[in-house]
Amino acid sequence: MKPARPSIYLAAAAAVSLSGLSACGGGGGSSGDTAPPVTMGTLAVSMTDAPSCGFDAINVTVNKVRVNQSSSASDTDAGWTDITLNPARKINLLTLTNGTLEALGQTALTAGHYTQLRLVLDPNTSNGLANSVVVSGSTTEQSLDTPSAVQSGIKLINAFDVAAGQRVDLVLDFDACKSIVTKGNGKYALKPVVKVIPTTLNGIGGFVSTALLASHVMVSAQQSGAIVSATTPNPTTGEFALSRLPLGNYDVVVTADSRAAAVVGTVPVTSTSATVAISTAAAPITLPATATGSIGGTVTLTPASSTATAYVAAKQSFVAGPTVTIKYQGADLASGSYTLSGLPVGAPQYAVYSATLPLQFASAATVLPGAGKYMVEASAEGYTTASLPLVDISLLNQSNVNFSLKP
């Protein structure tokens, strides 16, 4: 399983056709002639992704991107402008890490105020593999069940303005880890979680030790324990980039199989065009070996919901530092069951950010004294979040950590 983060890049760029201007005003071109006003821009769309929990591939087949000035417009209403991929393109989202973008196309767009975006996917056909997953450690491509909404478009409400002759850029972040959930009987479902993030290529970067690269390393930028962005390092060099972050302070969490977590506290992102380094190739981040354990149970939604997905997170809080998420997972849609496996028993390593590298990590005291102790939190949209403040896996796996969520 991996804790964390695909993204879609939209650029509305000025597009002015000059080919017809010579016909204006006749052959004489009097001093009173004026060029027609610029009323169009261009919308260009690309896709990028962050990693997903427990999968080697997540494939979606993109049919089109749609935009509308009305936030309440249905898929059959007037006013839509489409970017259509012909043929539709099957994309493995997990190849688009560390800020990589995949261009999907572009279209002319009338200047104005836009409030709705939709990402339209092809439905699975008889072979069932337009949208699919490959579970980590497997070579079998499995069908990914998609809700009917993906055929009319995954609806994204986000206002933006396209000014005449100007350009606007958006990035849509498709959270793969939250978007893929089990649904019983070994099947998987797509429950799209997509958000808008900044377009500029800023953020936080660094290196992890190449000795860790076979251990499912995950790097995430968090605020108050919420994962804002996540990525996996380059499989050869160990370099990572948490790209396109809103300005602010972040806690960077590095996890890997059978390793204690490393946390860098309060990393400042103050520029929209620069990347803050927290480690170098000469002195990469390393993680000490540790035993691991698991926390499992069920999440019950009352009243039951056919659309809401419950998520469970294992968190740790430092006495003199932040609260961070170590791992999280969506509960099974059919049974509500979950298992957070591979949780480190060893104490996390902590360092406060400094511009002077390398950072000095040390085992840090957590709010819950002793290693192998977690706060476990369950949440679902439309329900009140619930948490258990002390779950101890230092001596025994915990398999009966249950939650009942109500509005």
Image: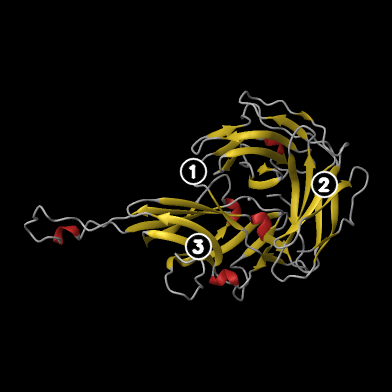
Please identify the quarter of the rendering in which residue 266 is found: top right
Name the residue tied to disc 1: 200
Q: Earlier in the sequence, mark 1 or mark 3?
A: 3
Name the residue tied to disc 2: 375
Q: Secondary structure at mark 3?
A: strand
Measured in 3D between alpha carbons, the distance from the residue under mark 1 to the one under mark 3, in whole angstroms, is 20 Å
Tags 1 and 2 in contact by the CB under 8 Å rule? no
Q: Secondary structure at mark 1?
A: loop
**How many C-alpha atoms fall within 10 Å of the one at disc 1: few (<14), some, or many (≥20)?**
some
Q: Earlier in the sequence, mark 1 or mark 2?
A: 1
Q: Residue furthest front?
A: 407
Name the residue tied to disc 3: 117
Tell me which colouring the rendered structure shows. secondary structure
Instruction: For residue 281, say whether it is visible.
Output: yes
Q: Indicate left or right for 387 with 11 as reference.
A: right
Measured in 3D between alpha carbons, the distance from the residue under mark 1 to the one under mark 2, in whole angstroms, is 35 Å
Q: Residue furthest right?
A: 395
Tags 1 and 3 in contact by the CB under 8 Å rule? no
Front-most of residues 86 and 369: 369
Give, as a three-letter code, the residue at label 3. Answer: Leu
Image coordinates of residue 122 in percent, x first then y, are: 55, 70
**How many C-alpha atoms fall within 10 Å of the one at disc 2: few (<14), some, or many (≥20)?**
some
Relative height, residue 315 to residue 312 (above, below): above
In the picture, the disc for residue 262 is none
Image coordinates of residue 18 in percent, x first then y, are: 22, 56
Q: Indicate left or right for 236 with 384 as reference.
A: left
Q: Secondary structure at mark 2?
A: strand
- Name which residue lies at 77% across and 70% down: 304
**How many C-alpha atoms fall within 10 Å of the one at disc 3: few (<14), some, or many (≥20)?**
many
Image coordinates of residue 379 in percent, x first then y, are: 75, 57
Relative height, residue 121 to residue 49 (above, below): below
